[in-house]
Image: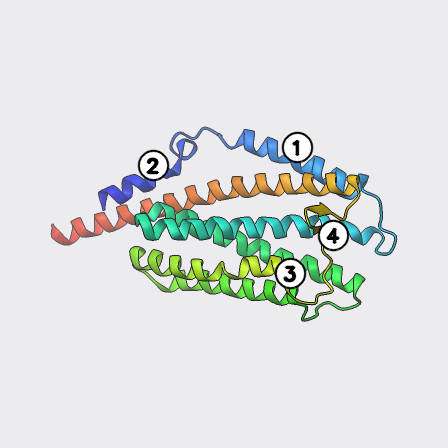
Amino acid sequence: MANATGDAVAQVGPAARTGRPTGIPWAAGLLVLFWFGGFMAFLDSPDAQVLGATVRIFYIHVAVAWLAGLAFLVNWMGSILYLVRRDLRVDRWAAVSAEIGEVFTTAVLVTGSIWARVAWNTWWTWDPRLTTALVMWFLYLAYLVLREGVSRPESRAAVSAVVGIVAFVDVPVVFLSTRWWRSIHPVIEQNGTFALSPHMLLAMFAMLAAVTAFYVYILRLRVRQEAARDAIEAMRLRLRSRGETS
């Protein structure tokens, strides 16, 4: 128990232990990236011929979809690594990444529905891309609910790792669904070539850079929070055990 406590405290980070605001450079960098990405996507990018100003949802939709896929990839790698090393710190990173991915998958479904209402005159259709994305949302929701239902940390981590590995199978299926099945969902990349103007491409990559930096920032922050919570829980159990033996 003492080792677990020490590992958790070590991951809390110097900011939490000393009070120094080490997140300020990260926050400043994020503001710059989001300012540039938002300017390129919402102010500098031209309207589309058919969709008009609604095309700007595209930049948010693609960015959050990329972030969801990245978060689930980190969860998958962390799940495999946990089964190899049995290190609860790895499980912590995997779980937090799945949590972030689930939030942004929700954003994918919401922004996609808004775009579909304008482009297809419907909020939802059982298109292969939409359907597989919804399945992905339910899979990782089950992952998070399952974690809450297992109290023993080692058992929770092991079961979660297996579920995380299985759930990730759907992530490449979401990406490839428009190529495997007949779909009305637009494809912006074909054979390594983007079907976007240079201006739209720059705006898209600006938003991708911004949300990726945001993911890294939130991931590190949430891992430190979970490490602090685990350290407090471990100390509480130690105090309880001492009280019962005294």
Q: Earlier in the sequence, mark 4 or mark 2?
A: 2
The residue under the point 73% across, 58% down is 186
Q: Is mark 4 on a helix, strand or loop?
A: helix
Q: Earlier in the sequence, mark 2 or mark 1?
A: 2
Residue 140 x/y as whole percent: 49, 61
User: Along the horizontal axis of the image, is 27 left or right of 149?
Assistant: right
Residue 147 vs 18, above or below: the answer is below
Q: How far, Cα to Cα, is label 3 from label 2?
A: 37 Å
Residue type of the residue flagged with mark 1: Val
Residue type of the residue flagged with mark 2: Ala
Residue 108 x/y as whole percent: 64, 57
Residue type of the residue flagged with mark 3: Leu
Q: How far, Cα to Cα, is label 4 from label 2?
A: 41 Å
Name the residue tied to disc 1.
32
- Callout 1 environment at 10 Å: few (<14), some (14 to 19), or many (20+)? few
Q: Which of marks 1 and 3 is nearer the N terminus?
A: 1
Cβ–Cβ under 8 Å for marks 4 and 1: no
The residue under the point 62% across, 52% down is 65
Name the residue tied to disc 2.
10
- Callout 2 environment at 10 Å: few (<14), some (14 to 19), or many (20+)? some
Q: What element carries label 3?
A: helix
Cβ–Cβ under 8 Å for marks 2 and 1: no
Name the residue tied to disc 3.
109
